Image (spheres, coloured by chain):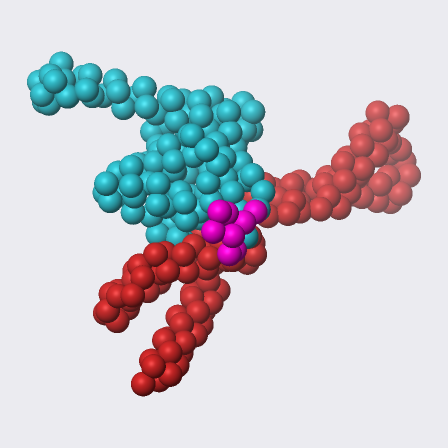
Chain colours: A cyan, B red
């Protein structure tokens, strides 16, 4: 998982590029939170569905990642409430402005790598 | 028969809860206080979503969950230890500097008292006072919470 880098810099001083590259699971967590607030179990499910089961986060790994993301200011806690099933109170998480900028920067970085691979004919030019 | 099955399921659940609670003790206290309930709720959600499955599948699920918890707890312990180590050297250095400055100030005063012929000038007195104050400030400043 992603660990804080650029020691000595405060959160406000850190630019989105300072957090790159992200680990795949960190990037997937940010993507899962890009369209709405979710609780831990919903993040897990979303990541598994979006990656067709390729990335599966364990509960311990997920909350360790969330703790670091919250500490780095990429994700914010959005309070506790019961979900639609209404059986348990759950803590919700949302993407911060910095988190969204970091997710965009990582997406651009990956897109640039794909363009390079395509130019070098390592992958089919039709791959988008 | 149904009652026996229910009792067996219930005792398995109690056992899994107990094992999870023990595994959660491997985390640093601060992490456990904030996330233990969330982790347990998420694991129960996952188990519920599996529905009725064979016992080996249930055992495999809990084994995977346990391994993940222990691995994650080890990572949290390491991160915690690194954080402490990164704070501690600065703290030790500040304390050493504090002791040095106080010793310098006290030594200067003691020398001044012991050797009345060599009185301190105003600048030396000022520097001695500042050194003592700075030293006491460094020594008495509280260690930042980790």
Residue, far top: A119
- Residue A111 lies in the magenta-colored region: no
From the viewer's side, name the closer residue of A65 and A5: A65
From the viewer's side, name the closer residue of B139 and A15: A15
Which residue lies at the image location 37% right of the left edge and 78% below the top edge? Answer: B6
Q: For the C terminus of chain A, which image quadrant? A: top left
Which residue lies at the image location 84% right of the left edge and 34% below the top edge? Answer: B129
Q: Which residues are magenta?
A: A81-88
Q: Is residue A88 visible?
A: yes
Q: Percent x, y for residue A1?
A: 36, 41
Q: Percent x, y for residue A100?
A: 44, 25
Quarter of the view holding residue A11: top right
B146 to B17, vertically: above or below:
above
Quarter of the view holding residue B16: bottom left
Which residue lies at the image location 10% right of the left edge and 23% below the top edge? Answer: A123
| Left or right for B90, reference A67 | right
Q: Is the stretch drawn in magenta largely helix, strand or loop?
A: loop
| Left or right for B54, reference B35 | left
Q: Percent x, y for residue A118?
A: 14, 17
From the viewer's side, name the closer residue of B11 and B30: B11
């Amino acid at each position: 998982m992603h660990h804080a880098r650029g020691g000595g810099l405060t959160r406000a001083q850190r630019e989105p590029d300072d957090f790159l590259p992200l680990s795949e699971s960190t990037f997937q967590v940010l993507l899962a939170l890009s369209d709405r607030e979710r609780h831990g179990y919903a993040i897990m499910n979303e990541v598994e569905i979006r990656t067709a089961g390729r990335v599966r986060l364990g509960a311990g790994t997920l909350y360790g990642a969330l703790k670091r993301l919250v500490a780095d200011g990429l994700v914010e806690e959005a309070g506790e409430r019961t979900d639609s099933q209404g059986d348990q109170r759950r803590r919700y998480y949302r993407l911060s402005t910095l988190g969204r900028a970091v997710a965009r920067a990582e997406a651009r970085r990956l897109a640039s790598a794909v363009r390079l691979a395509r130019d070098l004919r390592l992958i089919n030019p039709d791959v988008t | 028969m149904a009652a026996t099955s229910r009792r067996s399921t219930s005792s398995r659940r109690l056992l899994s809860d107990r094992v999870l609670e023990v595994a959660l003790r491997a985390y640093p206290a601060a992490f456990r206080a904030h996330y233990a309930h969330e982790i347990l709720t998420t694991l129960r959600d996952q188990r519920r979503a599996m529905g009725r499955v064979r016992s080996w599948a249930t055992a495999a699920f809990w084994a995977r969950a346990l391994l993940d918890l222990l691995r994650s707890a080890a990572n949290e312990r390491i991160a915690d230890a690194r954080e402490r180590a990164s704070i501690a050297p600065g703290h030790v250095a500040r304390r050493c500097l504090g002791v040095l400055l106080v010793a310098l100030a006290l030594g200067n005063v003691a020398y001044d008292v012991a050797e009345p012929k060599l009185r301190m000038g105003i600048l030396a007195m000022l520097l001695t006072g500042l050194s003592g104050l700075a030293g006491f400030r460094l020594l008495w400043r509280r260690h930042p919470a980790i």
